[in-house]
Image: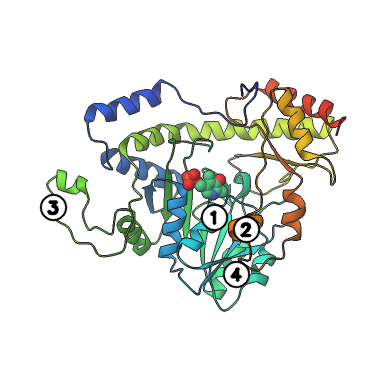
Amino acid sequence: MDWKIPLSDIDFGPEEMLAVQNVLQSKWLTMGAATEAFEQAFAAYIGSKYAIAVTNATAALHLACVVAGLGPGDEAIVPSLTFVATANAVRYTGALPVFADIVGEQDLNISYHAIERAITERTRAILVMHYGGYACDMPSIMELARERGLKVIEDAAHAPGSELGGRKLGTWGDIGCFSFFSNKNMTTGEGGMIVTDNEMFAQRLRLLRSHGMTTLTWDRHKGHAWSYDVVDLGYNYRIDEIRSALGRVQLGKLPVNNERRRRLTQIYRDTLRELVPQVSVPFEKHPGISAAHLMPILLPAGMGRSYFMELMKARGIQTSIHYPPIHTFAAYRGKGRQYLPNTIDIAAREITLPLYAGMTDEDVYNIVRTMARALVFV
Ligand SMILES: *Cc1c(COP(=O)(O)O)cnc(C)c1O
């Protein structure tokens, strides 16, 4: 499909080409100096003590669940309105994801009250996901978690650079996980990052990322070691130098690109209010600074969503939905207690509009005008 306006797009230029070329010329491709530099730059930007780069955010979430101590017989509270990886990560450890509802039409994030109601004596952790880059209620959730002795893992895949109360998302909880998949605000193709201030977690995360081995090929190359022990049941979740070099360049562009996304979001909000007042726009007065990863809207109840998406597609505009709720998937039938009225109602009405830093203001006006015409027919 040749879209006039795609859902998302990547900002790559000569800087990325050069960074990759430099790695290729160095002939060192596996985790080494470029990865260390990327991790240090990311930690400095986010304001965390440690950053550990991994192969993708799903691996990041899995390792976060392992070091948080999740295992068979444990429960972790998760939203259902998120990408399936948030809940899968819990299940990889043998623990059970327990779904909690979202706040409502204005806030598509997991609800503090729903979390509180879902806690049992088996609960060990809470996984939050900052929908579209908009912050969950972290002050309340962290206070609850501290009171009950629960670990908090942030799925910050949408939220690199988002802030709440002057603090970057990903640093509120015990561990934060980021994604650099192709459609995210910054990308390395596939890639992920784990951030934490906990030294013990950081040490264990580094071990688990690479088979639980005490030294890396890189250490041995530098002559620092010639053998190793295996001290934990680890994985191969390593990133590589090509992607780390890309990541560093993309991280440099992130603040400007996020600012552009926020500006486009504001134009969307103003134009939607004027031309299509029948759709509701979440996160209108949300606190904090969003990375503006997604532009979600909600259709009025009963309006034909797939027909509307087809009309937009016929005019060359790609739309999507975020997300089919996890608890409705075949692989999740019968898993996790669930009372999710807001998730069910809102997920059925949600549509995601195109949003990326390279869009023009005129693109936004075009999309909203096209919506106004299409909505006459649905
Ligand atoms: C993209 C995404 C993930 C998975 O990231 P990968 O890097 O593709 O593994 C997890 N959670 C959310 C909310 C995402 O959007």
Q: Are marks 2 and 1 in contact (CB under 8 Å)?
A: yes
Quadrant including the N terminus: top right
Q: Is residue 155 above or below residue 276?
A: below
Mark 2 residue type: Pro
Alpha-carbon distance for marks 3 and 2?
44 Å
Alpha-carbon distance for marks 3 and 4?
45 Å
Q: Which residue is mark 2?
A: 79
Q: Which residue is mark 1?
A: 86
Q: Horizontal and vertical percent for residue 148? A: 56, 75
Mark 3 residue type: Ala
Q: Nearer the viewer, residue 218 or 91?
A: 91
Q: Which residue is mark 4?
A: 144
Alpha-carbon distance for marks 3 and 1?
37 Å
Question: Which structural element holds mark 4?
Answer: helix
N-terminal-most mark, 3 or 2: 2
N-terminal-most mark, 1 or 4: 1
Mark 1 residue type: Thr
Mark 4 residue type: Leu
CB at disc 1 and ligand 1 closer than 8 Å: yes
Q: Which residue is mark 3?
A: 225
